[in-house]
């Protein structure tokens, strides 16, 4: 009998021990994963049952939580439920859905908005003591509503994106992505309806123009923030980086004479497939040579393929890395990493021909609009590239300041003398006779800029313009991309279509 009792006692103790271990594991080790599991509806009820903090632009909330009479207690509302107004900011705000899916700032600033960030521990302690309902903090953005509206209106019906930065701080003044969407349709409290609305958006990739008339669709849908997560061939805007490498590493200046042939044979090639011509087959120079400044002014392709080959793989790759384009930035949303020959999984081939082709912004090379804006911002800020950021400050439910973003130098890709030379060259693109960026001129303001028309066969060219203004005291740096909106004609280049959009954005920023 004693032996039987001992065995039974051992089994009972083992069961209690197993229960204690399992409980400890669930409550402490697995708690985080269980809370974040989208199937955990208890967590969703908790999140939506809380007075979630607002997202604020220009002192006015663009996202709020409104009390409702249902199990969730609060309804997340974007721009007061106005679909058109909500779409202006949707790629930034994202959405918070009852399905457990949340995107944009709703996801990446969730700790603040939901009142769960470590910095809010005192508020949580006070709520615990007083028994008051927990409240989220307000997240105040760097976005200037007038600049944002100007960018939204200027892009019109184009598929593309626009970014405006304060080059001296890195603050993001505007970030527009089109086509956009109405997050209110996904924030409903019916899970089936929210899922259907989201799935519909995922299947709404816009149709794009093609050179052969074939039916093609964008790789990016409305829920993708094209400004930070869409990668495009940068075209001739990349000639700024090529020029920076030539000046910084090769000791060139705007007045340095460089080869500018009618046809450039890519190194390591011998047939017509390896030949590069200028836009429209034009001649850049009757002598076959021109200054670096003039080559940038008229955007001479053959000059910059040869220039990249002269700088070489090491120099071109180094400049790309010195801009930080091989890294992601949290703004707080994570930005996509750029692609360059030999520096990414999608561009492993760094043969001399690939490097030369990159000099004019073509080949195995991809950048986001934010990264292209960062090139201009670095030039505008004397070679110091400030880290882009979207959150200006965070305030708790009592409007006490929780955090304030301090500008931070991100990279210094080149010297101030190189920045000065690039500024001179970019001003000539916009202001001098024959410059490709005349469409960006602003009366009474000197603008520095660069056009880009990137071939994307069989799709139509992707059009670019990047710039900053005023050139002598920069207040804003801009990048505009129009996805597959070109037709390889002088009337539909980056200079013709994208530069006037950039001008309107810059004008709105300068007028503040």
Image (tube, rainbow, N blue to C red):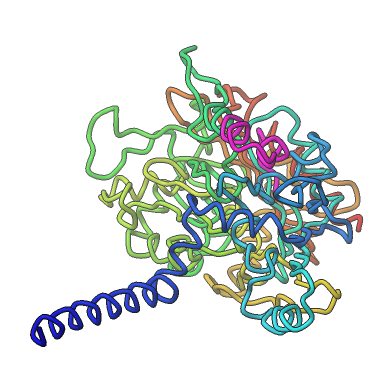
The one of 338 and 116 positioned closer to us in this rendering = 116
In the current view of this chain or complex, which residue is farthest to the front? 1
Residue 18: x %, y % from top left: 28, 75
The one of 213 and 112 positioned closer to us in this rendering = 112
Residue 24: x %, y % from top left: 39, 77
Residue 474, quarter of the rendered image: bottom right
Residue 46: x %, y % from top left: 64, 59
What residue is shown at x 87% (from left), y 50% (from top)? 146
Residue 317, compared with residue 262, is above or below; it is below
What residue is shown at x 24% (from left), y 82% (from top)? 13
Judge whether residue 495 is colored magenta: no
Magenta stretch, residue numbers: 175-198
User: How many numbered marks are there?
Assistant: 0
What residue is shown at x 81% (from left), y 47% (from top)? 68
Left or right? Give the position of 437 relative to 413: right
What residue is shown at x 31% (from left), y 41% (from top)? 266
């Amino acid at each position: 009998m004693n032996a039987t009792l001992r065995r039974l006692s051992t089994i009972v103790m083992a069961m209690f021990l197993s229960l204690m271990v399992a409980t400890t594991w669930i409550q402490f080790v697995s708690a985080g994963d269980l809370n974040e599991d989208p199937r955990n509806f208890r967590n969703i009820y908790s999140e939506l049952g809380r007075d979630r903090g607002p997202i604020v632009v220009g002192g006015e909330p663009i996202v709020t939580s409104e009390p409702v009479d249902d199990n969730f207690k609060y309804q997340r509302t974007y721009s007061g439920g106005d679909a058109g107004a909500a779409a202006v900011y949707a790629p930034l705000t994202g959405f918070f859905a009852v399905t457990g899916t949340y995107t944009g700032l709703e996801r990446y600033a969730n700790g603040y908005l939901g009142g769960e960030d470590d910095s809010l521990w005192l508020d949580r302690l006070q709520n615990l003591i007083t028994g008051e309902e927990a409240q989220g903090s307000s997240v105040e953005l760097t976005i200037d509503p007038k600049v944002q509206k100007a960018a939204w209106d200027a892009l019109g019906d184009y598929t593309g994106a626009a970014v405006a930065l304060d080059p001296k701080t890195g603050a993001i003044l505007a970030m527009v992505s089109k086509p956009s969407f109405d997050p209110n349709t996904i924030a409903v409290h019916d899970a089936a309806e929210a899922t259907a609305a989201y799935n519909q958006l995922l299947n709404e990739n816009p149709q794009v123009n093609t050179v052969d008339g074939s039916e093609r669709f964008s790789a990016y849908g409305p829920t993708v923030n094209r400004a930070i997560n869409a990668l495009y061939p940068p075209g001739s805007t990349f000639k700024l980086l090529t020029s920076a490498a030539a000046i910084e590493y090769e000791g060139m200046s705007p007045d340095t004479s460089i080869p500018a042939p009618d046809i450039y044979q890519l190194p390591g090639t011998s047939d017509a497939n390896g030949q590069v011509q200028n836009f429209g087959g034009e001649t850049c120079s009757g002598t076959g040579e021109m200054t670096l400044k003039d080559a940038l002014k008229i955007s001479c392709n053959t000059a910059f393929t040869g220039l990249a080959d002269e700088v070489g793989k090491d120099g071109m790759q180094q400049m790309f890395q010195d801009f930080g384009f091989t890294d992601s930035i949290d703004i707080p949303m994570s930005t996509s990493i750029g692609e360059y020959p030999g520096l990414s999984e999608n561009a492993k081939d760094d043969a001399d021909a690939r490097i030369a082709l990159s000099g004019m912004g073509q080949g195995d090379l991809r950048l986001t609009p934010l990264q292209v804006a960062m090139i201009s911002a670095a030039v505008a800020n004397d070679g110091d590239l400030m880290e882009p950021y979207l959150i200006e400050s965070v305030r708790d439910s009592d409007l006490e300041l929780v955090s304030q973003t301090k500008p931070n130098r991100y990279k210094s890709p080149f010297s101030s003398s190189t920045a000065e030379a690039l500024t001179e060259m970019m001003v000539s693109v916009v202001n001098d006779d024959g410059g490709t960026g005349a469409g960006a001129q602003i009366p009474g303001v000197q603008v520095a800029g660069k056009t880009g028309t990137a071939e994307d066969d069989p799709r139509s060219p992707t059009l670019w313009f990047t710039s900053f203004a005023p050139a002598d005291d920069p207040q804003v740096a801009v990048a505009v991309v129009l996805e597959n909106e070109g037709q390889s004609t002088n009337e539909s280049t980056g200079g013709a279509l994208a530069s006037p959009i950039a001008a309107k954005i810059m004008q709105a920023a300068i007028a503040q």
